[in-house]
Amino acid sequence: MTDVGVEWINDFPSPCSQNTLSYCDDTSVGFLNGMTSRGHRAVFNWGNSNAWERDFRDVSLGGDDHTWVDNVDFAHFSSHGSTGTDNVFSGFFGSRLDSCTWRSNQTRYGENWNLEYLCIDACNSLELTRNIIATWQSTFQRLHQIFAFTDLVSDSWWTAGRGYNFGRRAGNNEVLSAAWLDESYSWWLDDNPVAMAAGRTQSDAINRLNNERVFSGFDDIPNNQITWFQWKWRS
């Protein structure tokens, strides 16, 4: 059984002002429902003002990830996002506790804790025009894979079911990268999903990316043993 937690934000009141979104609850809660429909366990579901940046930030940097995001096997985040020229991803929140944004350079997932899979349903979250290794390398502290998007991603009724569909297939023990790319790609709305895996060697990373399932038994890799990152996308 996989433990699942989700956080999503549609509303961004001051001081965390951003454009309002409409379907982040559909994508994150849909993912949670898809996973639980296959027998996995819902641990937390925080939305809007109840979703906090500190839940994603490492405890060594003053965050509380060991209680929340790094205390489940699979976490899903839906909101606004961007990756700057400094190769740091920012995910945006609607409540400032302690910040309106979580940053990829403040995340350390899996280090003797729990998180194996992170899904980021947000713009520019695995942004291929940036250096995605620089963006996410320090995050992989026994984390296995990240599922995210390059370029912009739609906030639309047309694609609101992608979270549920991915969760249902992931929870059914299908290959994770294939399920993500299949269910999150949209030619009509130009949604381009990306999956990224870490490995001890190039062949190990490729094998994990192409074959890992939630019950496939791949072991955790300490950050200092990672020598290769592999990713694929659909566009």
Image (tube, rainbow, N blue to C red):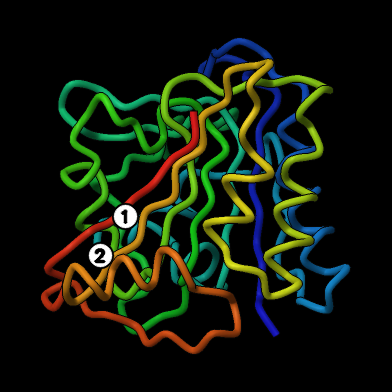
Which numbered disc flags the more N-terminal residue, 2 or 1? 2
Q: Residue at x 13, y 78 (%)?
A: 225
**Neighbours of disc 2 within 10 Å: few (<14), some (14-19), many (20+):** few
Residue 229 placement (x, y as % from top left): 23, 58
Disc 2 marks a residue whose amino acid type is Ser
Which residue position holds label 1? 107
Given residues 189 and 105, the one toward you in this image is: 189
The numbered mark at residue 60 is 2
Q: Quadrant of the N terminus?
A: bottom right
Q: Residue at x 73, y 70 (%)?
A: 171
Q: Position of residue 89 (x, y in %)?
A: 32, 34
**Picture mark count:** 2
Q: Is residue 2 above or below residue 75?
A: below
Q: Amino acid at mark 1?
A: Thr
Q: Quadrant for residue 50, please give it.
A: top right
The residue closer to the viewer here, 234 or 95, is 234
Classed neighbour count for the residue bearing mark 1: other residues with Cα under 10 Å, few (<14), some (14–19), many (≥20) = many
Label 2, label 1: how far apart the Cα atoms are: 10 Å
Q: Are marks 2 and 1 in contact (CB under 8 Å)?
A: no
What x and y, as percent, mark residue 137? 20, 55
